[in-house]
Image (cartoon, rainbow, N blue to C red):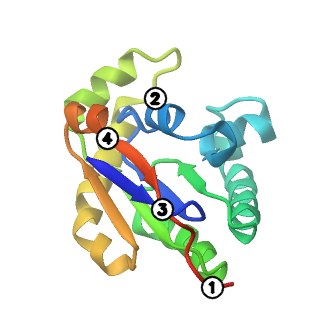
């Protein structure tokens, strides 16, 4: 699958922990293009797993996102983004900047996410991944209502491995 993205877009990576979003981002995007919630937690609290730093981390992520989009730079948000309200906040930032918004959805089997999680240096709680997976599945039917400019679904490990990114010309307008 070829995922076609404007070079000035917001790109939401959507999926539970363990779905491979960060690995995908590292393979397909420059480090400067990726805004990771874990990296933001590390910036503000010296620990990417410090959930107490989540509010501050997302405040920083939202600010960085607004700045990148105002400069017409691609911004890839590497967070679970499995809840509609979380996506709505990010989409509002893109709309204010008049930039396109795309989602790459990692709708992989729960068992795969749980297995990959166990291979991490610092595994997330299995209950959190189950909850994220459920929230993703519940929110998928509403993605069409979120006015995304493109939604790319990756449902298997093979889909993720075969995916390629293509950059198009920038969107017209201010």
> Which is in the foreground here, disc 3 or disc 4?
3
Q: Tag 1 or tag 3, which sits nearer the N-term?
A: 3
Q: Label 1 crowding class (10 Å Cα cut-off): few <14, some 14-19, many 20+?
A: few
Residue marked by disc 3: 168
Q: Label 2 crowding class (10 Å Cα cut-off): few <14, some 14-19, many 20+?
A: some
* 163 vs 121: above or below: below
Q: CA distance from mark 3 to mark 4?
A: 16 Å
Q: Which residue is at the front of the view, 58 or 29? A: 29
Q: CA distance from mark 1 to mark 4?
A: 29 Å
Q: Tag 4 or tag 1, which sits nearer the N-term?
A: 4
> Which is in the foreground here, disc 3 or disc 2?
3
Q: Label 3 crowding class (10 Å Cα cut-off): few <14, some 14-19, many 20+?
A: few
Task: Residue 173: give x, y in percent of width and height.
Answer: 63, 85
Q: Are marks 1 and 2 in contact (CB under 8 Å)?
A: no
Q: Tag 2 or tag 1, which sits nearer the N-term?
A: 2
Task: Residue 34: give x, y in percent of width and height.
Answer: 61, 45
Q: CA distance from mark 3 to mark 1?
A: 15 Å
Identify which residue is drawn at 55% across, 64% down.
9
Q: Is residue 99 left or right of residue 62?
A: left
Q: Which residue is at the front of the view, 80 or 77? A: 77
Residue marked by disc 4: 163
Q: CA distance from mark 4 to mark 2?
A: 26 Å
Residue marked by disc 1: 173
């Amino acid at each position: 699958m070829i995922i076609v993205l404007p070079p000035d877009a917001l790109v939401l990576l959507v999926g539970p922990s363990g779905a491979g979003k960060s690995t995908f981002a590292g393979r397909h995007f420059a480090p400067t293009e990726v805004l990771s919630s874990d990296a933001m937690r590390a910036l503000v609290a010296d620990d990417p797993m410090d959930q107490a730093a989540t509010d501050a981390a997302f405040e920083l992520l939202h600010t960085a996102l607004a700045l990148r989009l105002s400069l017409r730079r691609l911004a890839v948000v590497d967070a679970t983004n499995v809840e509609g309200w979380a996506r709505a906040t990010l989409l509002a930032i893109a709309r204010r900047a008049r930039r396109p918004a795309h989602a790459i959805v990692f709708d992989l089997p729960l068992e795969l996410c749980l297995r990959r999680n166990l291979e991490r240096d610092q595994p997330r709680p299995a209950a959190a991944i189950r909850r994220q997976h459920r929230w993703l599945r519940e929110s998928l039917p509403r993605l069409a209502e979120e006015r995304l400019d493109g939604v790319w679904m990756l449902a298997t490990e093979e889909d993720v491995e075969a995916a390629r990114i293509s950059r198009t010309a920038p969107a017209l307008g201010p």
